[in-house]
Amino acid sequence: MKRRWKLSIGLGACLLAAAVLLAGLDAADKAFPPPLDGAKVVSAEVLDRDGELLRAFATPEGRWRLRTRPEDVDLRFLKMLVAYEDQRFHDHAGVDLWAIGRAVLQLVTHGRIVSGASTLSMQVARLIEPRETRSFSAKLLQFVRAIQIERRLSKGEILELYLTRAPYGGNLEGVRAASLAYFGKEPRRLSVAEAALLVALPQSPEGRRPDRHRQAAQAARERVLQRAAVAAITGEGEAERAAGDPIPAKRLQLPAYAAHLAEVAIRRQPKAEAHHTTLKRSIQSGLEQVAREAAAKLAPKVSLAMVMADATTGEIVGEVGSADYFDASRSGWIDMTRVLRSPGSTLKPFIYGLAFEQGLVSQETIIEDRAADFFGYRPKNFDMTYQGDVSVRQALQLSLNVPAVRLLDAVGPSRLMVRFRRAEIKPVLPPNEAPGLAIGLGGVGISLKDLVQAYAALANRGSPVKLGNGVEDQPGLIEAGPLLEPVAAWNIADILSDIIPPQGSRRLGIAYKTGTSYGYRDAWSVGYDGRHVLGVWVGRPDNGAVPGIAGYQTAAPILFSAFEKSGVAVTPFPPAPAGAMRLAQADLPNSLRRFSVTASGLFSASAREPAPQIIYPPEGARVDLGARSGEMSPLVLKLQGGRAPFRWLANGKPLQDLSRRRTHDWTPDGAGYSTLTVIDAVGRAATVRVFVE
């Protein structure tokens, strides 16, 4: 009885002291402000394009504390929380005097504490300024702090502090961290049973931890469910059904995707709370799953990397820097998407594209695959054999080396490098070396990101885009002109989309190319559809040889698996642009039926006439043909040199039959850039690019 009166007197003293403190609050408020600045320290988050969590970083004191706003949480959870913890939350000013009076009366009547008087504001005060002991002075401090907090913050901001800092056992703080750790989902999608458990845990976070004290957690959840039923927060029978749901038996790991990018984001902006990227979490998850499965089949010390991008915008939607960031045996901490490596045969499509663009070949043009010597450079095929006469289409699909070098010799290595620079792609040549024919077979360094950026232009009808993940660089269109003209890009896609998938993979409707670098150091595969492009690299980060790896056998199966498990729907290729067609070999003009060069790489028909040269319009000219008026005037094309008859092409499309005249009239389809090409009787070509307005 004596103890009961002592408790009553103590609580009454608290009530009286609170009333006194209210009277002089202004002075105390200014002299003794609440520590709200420190209360706002939360875990840094790396987010995907939709705001989904990719990875979080613990606070400096090692807490998982994710900012949680009321709108981030299921509405029924908020209603349960208020009903169970602070029914008058929206009415009081921090301290609920009515609840204190009720608690004192119950104590006197029952001889024990039946219900508490702590408000959510008081609990926030305790969370931001933890007390050492449960004393009356500590409770008085809570009263003061609760009132101060209410004067500074709105009810929504107070609720946000509680949702962010409420303890949930171990180093988990806040509803969002707890929901991810116990249920593996964001709190906006909580079930009734899950919401009730998260309401109950903060009262005794260690004693009710579901992964350690299942029965205590279940009993606490049932009490919350009963209160929710009484308050009509749940429907009829809903609380009873929720009581039968299982209690989570273990704590899950918080999302930890895109490890390399997340580390970069933190290094670049260490004080930022949220780091936004262009990645899509579902795609990133699928790619990382494929990487883990593929790594299990690879030799020790062999890693892999992947980059997937939207070719229409340049946004990187998924990137995997290594097989496993934490695998030291594979140097997993190295981001292999940014490291320069030899691309093998993956640059060949761009050589063929330039040849198509310049009118040197058609898909069914015959080209020789035989031993050749290009001023001392003697390329050989991967299998050390030769196919003889093949079509250009077959040569690219089979990735034959000699035909690719023949075409590169014709179009010029420097022209290829200029096109790459136009698309902001930066292949690196060996020190003090000029662009040479070895570029076509991998004699240059390029990163996986840049290689995917090059193929993104192919997927985007030849128009280059800048790839970006929103952290290291920003995506966007590049206005410097096409990497390849649309007709040439269409020809490449038409050829690559007909390559047989690797063994064990099904057709997906994508175009793809593989490559293997010299000495079996790198295996590549890059594929694309009408919208997305995906690149895969396999090799050792230390540049060591990996006997047996090859683009087709090693990287291509990963490419096809990643395309499937990324979750993106394969987008059909766009319709063929004007002038694009695949002619049978018999329908080609004589000059396009065979691409014939000597061992030195020069055209075999060494005519006495000089090579053809377009003298009007000059390269890069802007020609006003009345496009704005809607009535286009014809443009007179003039050439000199070359051997008649001549074949004219505009944007890869033949203009008319062969002509022996050195002038020709051409009426463009519309305004913009156009590529004009003339081919003489012995296959020599000249090309200019003009802008029609």
Image (cartoon, helix red, strand yellow):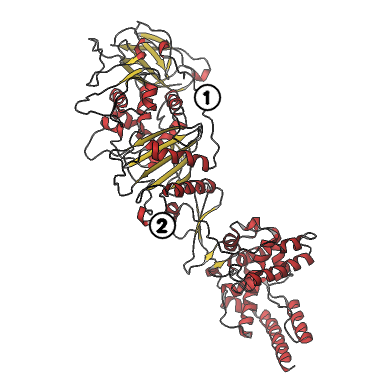
* Percent coordinates x, y for residue 203 in the rendering: 64, 73
* Percent coordinates x, y for residue 631 in the rendering: 52, 14
The local secondary structure at tag 1 comes to loop
Residue sitting nearer the eye, 212 or 112: 212
Quarter of image, res 393: top left
Distance CA(mark 1)–CA(mark 2): 45 Å
Residue sitting nearer the eye, 693 or 89: 89
* Percent coordinates x, y for residue 621 in the rendering: 37, 21
Q: Mark on residue 326?
A: 2
Q: Mark on residue 75?
A: none
* Percent coordinates x, y for residue 546 in the rendering: 31, 44
Q: Note whether 270 is above or below 484 in the view shown.
A: below
On the rendered structure, is 52 left or right of 304? right
Q: Note whether 405 is above or below 76 in the view shown.
A: above
Residue sitting nearer the eye, 626 or 332: 332
On the rendered structure, is 546 left or right of 459? left
* Mark 1 closeness class: few <14, some 14–19, many ≥20 residues within 10 Å: few
The type of residue carrying mark 2 is Phe
Q: Earlier in the sequence, mark 1 or mark 2?
A: 2
Q: Are marks 1 and 2 in contact (CB under 8 Å)?
A: no
* Mark 2 closeness class: few <14, some 14–19, many ≥20 residues within 10 Å: few
**Number of marks drawn:** 2
Mark 1 vs mark 2, foreground winner is 2
Task: Please indicate, yes or no, whether residue 357 appears anywhere in the rendered image.
Answer: no
On the rendered structure, is 604 left or right of 224? left
Q: Which residue is mark 1?
A: 575
Task: Please indicate, yes or no, whether residue 640 appears anywhere in the rendered image.
Answer: yes
The type of residue carrying mark 1 is Pro
Q: Residue furthest top?
A: 660
- Report the quarter where the N terminus lies: bottom right
